[in-house]
Image (tube, rainbow, N blue to C red):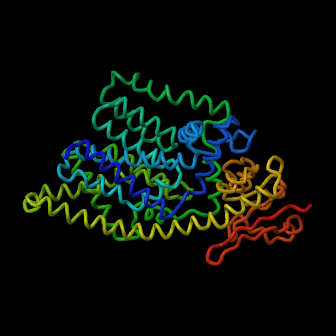
Amino acid sequence: MSLRLKLGGIFLAAVAVRMAFHLVTGFTADDAYITFRYSENLAGGLGFVYNVGEQVMGTSTPLFTWLLAMLALVRIPVVTGALLVSLVCSGLTAVVLYRLANNLRFGSLSWLPTLAYIVWPRSIPAETCGMETALFTLMVTAALYYHHRHLCYYAIGLATLATLTRPEGALVLFLLLVSSCRKDRHCWKSYLVVPALLLIPWLSFAQFYFGSILPHSITAKLALYSRFGTDSWWDSLVYLLGWHNPVGWLMFPAAVIGGWWLNRKQNFGALEACWLIVSMIAYTFSGTRLFFWYVAPLYPVYLLLATAAVVWVRERSEFLHYRQRMLASVVSTLLLILSVAGLYRQVDHFRTMQTYSDEFLKPVAGYLRENANVSRDLVGAEDIGYIGYYSKCRILDRDGLVSPIAVEYNRNAEYFDLILGTRPDWVGAAVGSPISGFINDPQFLADYRLVRDFGGRNIPGYNLYRRVR
């Protein structure tokens, strides 16, 4: 089989698995709709805003937002565009991973990290949920691939685009710049030109337009989760490495062995390991809640290191060296069995999450669209993705991502005081939410009337209140 056919098959396999998962679950994350609203407003000439007239950078992915806006201009809906971009990027990531493994002399086992990535239960939901994850994963993986091939300008350029896709990309960019400048000190100025050409225009625009080069959503999340929602550092580490099941405990020593072998044989892995370790330390001790789409970009490289351990075993075993087909069959079968088991649980979990959005958040948005004055009324709500996107109302984000006024209230756990201080016309509250305990307060009930209880049997519902005085 020609290389072109192999790469085409790899691309289509990654796309097919993710498309099947999305069709079965129908899952799109609530946070994704925040970016979708930014993109639609941008494409509609209303500015890089969530609420018209409020210049707040409540999304941390400017490149993805601009890309969806451009697709919207050619009449591709942002929801469809986000899925399309994610599927293409996932397929390309699988191709890049195969090329990288082939370059690292995995030989007949070059498909192994690619197969692991294609069916990896933690990557698939993150790359089909409407977030920028697949785009960011591709940029990082491709940057590391081109760096290994000593194509430094390509690597630095892709790392810069990764930084514009998600702030964490700055770490990859920094590591690649340091490594490239150390290898070729005479070219350090030209290496800096690439990120300067891409970053300076955006940072200048952000400072002028938003008043800050840092996404406000980062500040808002740190304030919100300073009071609840975060795990201990140990629980965060267990989640990152998957140590809650035997597969995670198997993968970790395999990644250590594989990384050691690649560094010793191919002089590869030091920079990649540094990126993984620093990222995991940052996520473990960041003080914010870990969402599944945060950590998914780490897995292609992690899987590459872990599967390199199989190549190391083959190299050291004369018996397996001459029985590579048998080794390939055993490992691939084991991978597929474990992945199918993991995906079965993921399907059930994300179906439940989508049920919450379809049965509660979308109906809340529909009710507001029909009963609220879209241009005048202020809606104070949490989980504003679906609600804001489908209602088109002016939103006071009680989580604070697009509403800076909420940050100090959340940092001090003064959730009811936010309502008292802003007096929104409507208040949306998830039943049992840590920031909605005030819904039983007599003062709140004196000012607001419950107009609709979007309740459910097995899932906590969502209440909608309207101000009466």
* Position of residue 178 measured from the top left corner of the image (x, y, whole percent): 38, 34
Q: For this view, does 417 lie left or right of residue 204?
A: right
255 and 136: which one is in front? 136
Up the image or down, 279 lies above or below 249; here it is above
Q: For this view, does 10 lie left or right of residue 202?
A: left
49 and 386: which one is in front? 386
Q: For this view, does 9 lie left or right of residue 313?
A: right
Up the image or down, 371 lies above or below 37; here it is below
* Position of residue 297 measured from the top left corner of the image (x, y, whole percent): 43, 50
Task: Please identify the quadrant where the C terminus is shown.
Answer: bottom right
Up the image or down, 349 lies above or below 212; here it is below
Up the image or down, 200 lies above or below 3; here it is above
430 and 199: which one is in front? 430
Displayed quadrant of residue 319:
bottom left
* Position of residue 4 measured from the top left corner of the image (x, y, whole percent): 26, 42
What residue is at 29 percent from the left and 61 percent from the top? 253
What residue is at 52 percent from the left and 30 percent from the top? 199
Residue furthest out toward the right = 469
